[in-house]
Image (cartoon, rainbow, N blue to C red):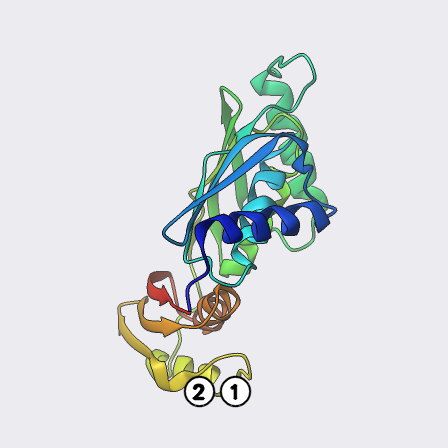
Amino acid sequence: MRKKDEDLASFVMDELILDPRVDHAAIGVSADNAMVILRGTVGTFREKREAERAAKRVHGVELVNNELQVRPLLNHEVREDAELRGDVLQALMLDSLVPPTVDADVRGGCVTLTGTAEWQYQRDEAELVASNIVGALHVVDEVTLTPTPYKGDVKDAIGRAFERNAKLDAQHLMVTTSKGTVTLKGKVGSWAEHDEALNAAWSVPGVTRVEDRLTVTY
């Protein structure tokens, strides 16, 4: 049974309050037909991401519209792009999960990640690192995946990964593949299950792109 929008918004706010990674003081929450809208301001792009993840943890949330604005400094000043880029590059270099082939460009506080990586988790790590830097208003991930060619059947490998994962109901998931692109279709019972399915697909060698057509239903 679908929760009432008023209850859903209240539950999401409770989740934000309990998440130590999110300062909920300047965040407003509303809901419309199981879609949650987040409005207000946060101090980092990472915090914006964490707020969305917190909302998706609440049972009954089918979609999150994240309209939070990043305002990192008390006086709302914007850092110089060159200074911000230097901090991003330094942080990327110090993270052993990020390959040295990843670069960054900054314009108007927006960080664009470029270069190459072999695995999706390396791209995710680079985006996480960049989003943590104070002054980064937005992060765009344009890192290109150049994986080692996979000699096996990608579709079969993903299917086995689904079956091994105790958090997934593989019977309701459909997979198609074409030249490194994986398309996922079907219904999942939560955002946690949705994320598990995507992670399982990305874990297979040779995958360069995952098209997410999964539907979260309760």
Percent x, y of residue 31: 44, 46
In the image shown, does 67 or 185 lie closer to the viewer? 67
Q: Is residue 114 left or right of residue 166?
A: left
Instruction: Check the picture and name the quadrant holding the C terminus.
Output: bottom left
What is the secondary structure assignment of the residue under circle 2?
helix
Percent x, y of residue 12: 57, 50
Mark 1 and mark 2: Cα distance apart in space: 6 Å
Above or below 117: residue 82: above
Above or below 101: residue 68: above
Percent x, y of residue 143: 45, 46
Total numbered labels placed on residues in the image:
2
Residue 160 is tagged as: 2
Amino acid type, residue under disc 1 in the picture: Arg
Marks 1 & 2, CB-CB < 8 Å contact: yes
The reply to whether residue 126 is in sight is no
Residue at the spot 57% in from the left edge and 39% down from the top edge: 48
Residue at mark 1: 164
Instruction: Check the picture and name the quadrant holding the N terminus.
Output: bottom left
Percent x, y of residue 50: 60, 47
In the image shown, does 119 or 173 lie closer to the viewer? 173
In the image shown, does 190 or 74 lie closer to the viewer? 190
Q: Is residue 83 left or right of residue 163?
A: right
Residue 58 is tagged as: none
What is the secondary structure assignment of the residue under circle 1?
helix
Above or below 166: residue 139: above
Q: Is residue 40 left or right of residue 114?
A: right
